[in-house]
Amino acid sequence: MTEETPSTEPRRGIAERTRELVQNIRGRSLLVRLAIAVVAITVFVLIPAYIATRPAFMERYPSTEVQYESWTTSVHAQVNCQSCHIPPNTAAQAGYSLRMVGQFYLQALPISQNPDLLKTPGDPACSSCHIDLRAVSPSGDLNIPHKAHVDELKIACIECHEFLVHETNPQGEHTPTMERCLKCHDGKTAKDECEACHNEKGAPLSHKATDWKIIHPDKQQEEDCESCHKWTENWCAQCHSTRPRSHAVDWRATHRDAVKQHRSCEACHEGSFCEKCHGLVPQLNFDSALKLVP
């Protein structure tokens, strides 16, 4: 009879089960480490990045407090800082988020400084949302051909919309001022007729009179000047603070004849101004009702 060798099957089964157990332990350990890494990244990176990239985060810096308050009243109050101030590409947006993670931790330290990460918005940031270039104001009374200004003339959006978000214009609004429009619409660089921009507002017939500049002080009680001129304070002074064309180099010799036709000296000059030469307030064609422009 041949002697039977002990079976190795039971031993093989034990070894395989041991290896499987070790692999399972290693697999679970890897999953645990991955879970810990995910939690750590979430707690120490993602959550700080979310908090630091919210506009409210900027409120804690004294230098941006005013800008933040103005932003809350603007039409962009639901738009995040990086949507406008950071170029609209993945690399730039991701880089900003990572830098703000650093600001999240720095702001807790005494050495914290205001972050200098937000640059002046460029046209690509504006056009990423404003795909349709508006041609008329929402109320319909003002022509604003953005396509002509942006595409043809290559004027940067910020040149006109300086009061759009972080500050208000002198009238307390987030809209461009007439002064800004008139820097170009001066009758030379661009047309300055009222009807060129205003659909429901044009120069009254009285303003088209050839002697309007002479007679307009007498007509101010008849005309509702503020309906058009309220866009700036002391609109009279806008013209009266500028030396009139009539005051040429020979004005000292010719002004007597001009006063005979229409005296309006007091619109700009107080009586003491005339006294410097005349010794008293000249009575020629004098109208005591004519007051100095404030």
Image: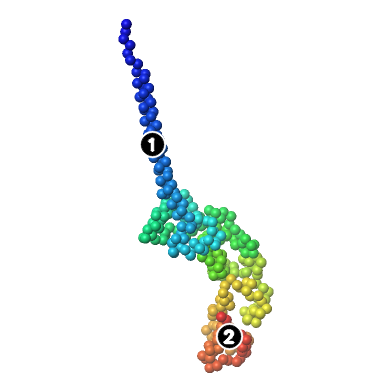
In this rendering, position of residue 91 left or right of residue 237: left
Q: Which residue is mark 2?
A: 266
The first of marks 2 and 1 along the sequence is: 1
Instruction: Please state if 244 lies on the left or on the right of 104 as rendered.
Output: right
Residue 29: which numbered mark, if any? 1
For the rendered model, the colour scheme is rainbow
The residue positioned 62% from the left and 79% from the top of the image is 213
Residue 75: x %, y % from top left: 56, 60
Nearer the observer, 250 or 226: 226
Residue 134 versus residue 229 in the image, above or below:
above
Q: Quadrant of the N terminus?
A: top left
Q: Quadrant of residue 8?
A: top left
Mark 1 and mark 2 in contact (Cβ < 8 Å)? no
Instruction: Look at the image and tell me whether residue 182 can be seen.
Output: no
The residue mark sitting in front, 2 or 1, is 1
The kind of residue on which mark 1 rests is: Ser
* Circle 2: element type: helix
Residue 251 x, y percent position in the rendering? 55, 85
The residue sitting at 45% across, 54% down in the picture is 52
Mark count: 2
Residue 173 image point, x, y percent? 56, 66
Q: Few, some or many C-alpha atoms within 10 Å of disc 1 (few <14, some 14-19, many ≥20)?
A: few
Badge 2 amino acid: Glu
Percent coordinates x, y for residue 217 in the rendering: 63, 81
Residue at mark 2 to residue at mark 1: CA–CA distance: 93 Å
Viewer-closest of 44 and 280: 44
Quadrant the C terminus occupies: bottom right
Q: Residue at x 40, y 35 (%)?
A: 28
Callout 1: helix, strand or loop? Answer: helix
Q: Pick out the residue farthest to the top.
A: 1
Residue drawn at (44%, 64%) of the image = 62
